[in-house]
Amino acid sequence: MKLALAQLGIDHGDVETNVERAVDAIEEAAARDVDLVCLPEIFNVGYFAFDRYPRAAEGLSGPTLSRISAAAAEHGINVLAGTIVEDLAETTDAPTPADEGLANTAVLFDRSGDRRAIYRKHHLFGYESAEAELLVPGEDPASGICEVEGFTAAITTCYDLRFPELYRELAANDVSLVLVPSAWPYPRVEHWTTLSRARAIENQCYVATINGSSEHEGTRLLGRSTVFDPWGTTLASAADDPALVVSEIDPGRVERVREEFPALRDRRLP
């Protein structure tokens, strides 16, 4: 499978411009014969535009995801729209973790523009962030698992990387590719790289991290969207400017690594 990570430049608060950039990235990925293209966390509003969350929130059938779904269908490409601020009260055609409130939600669309997976961020960031105050957490990580181009793929989001037990649960479900839309800022570069690589190594799967590229009120996203293979080797990566990171990945490689070095079989629970 050919995978693309769309490291978008994000103008915080400018939804129309950000969605246009996302659609342009989808079109470019399709022109490069990509099978799956992934977008960053809160790509339409901008993660740090917390004051815009209530006004910009929409349901899963709202304008942002409708536009992304249409682009996926138009170009015949799988798209991870990761993520938007979802207004749960506006979502009436999919299961929600609560009757109301806002969630940090990713949706994976297939080549026909149909939803294949919905993932609501499980771990909300509380450190000097309004996310945990404004949003409700997702309660079902398995809702982000689906089959894509020969992979059993799963979605997690940004801060989730710090919680290895979540990824162990995914490995127990035979996940071979984890997609991680993010809004990871400076200065925590080493955390970003180390945690992502560790999740790939310990679960013997591909991990693809999709970060944004922007600055808002003194906080700058560090970019560095990266594809790690099941050994933790970097297959493709970007610097901190907008980029489309493209890599070939193979589900058979996950099977071979797990067979050659069966560490997961040796796990002993206390």
Image (spheres, rainbow, N blue to C red):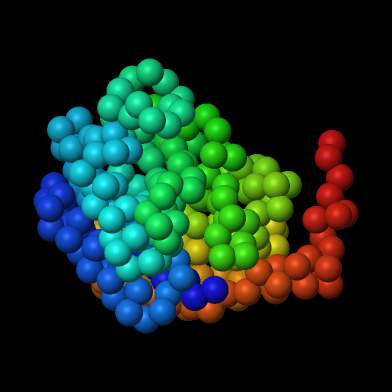
Say whether residue 126 is visible: no
x and y percentages locating residue 197 in the rendered image:
58, 64
Between 87 and 150, which is closer to the camera in this rendering?
Answer: 150
Q: Quadrant of the C terminus?
A: top right
- The extreme bottom residue here reads 32
Residue at 34 percent across and 60 percent down: it is: 73
x and y percentages locating residue 226 in the rendered image:
46, 70
Say whether residue 259 is visible: yes
Q: Quadrant of the N terminus?
A: bottom right
Between 40 and 97, which is closer to the camera in this rendering?
Answer: 97
Examine the image and state in which quarter residue 257 appears.
bottom right
* Above or below: residue 209 compared with residue 239: above
* Above or below: residue 155 compared with residue 21: above
Residue at 42 percent across and 31 percent down: it is: 94
**Residue 15 shown left or right of residue 240 in the figure:** left
**Residue 260 shown left or right of residue 217 in the figure:** right
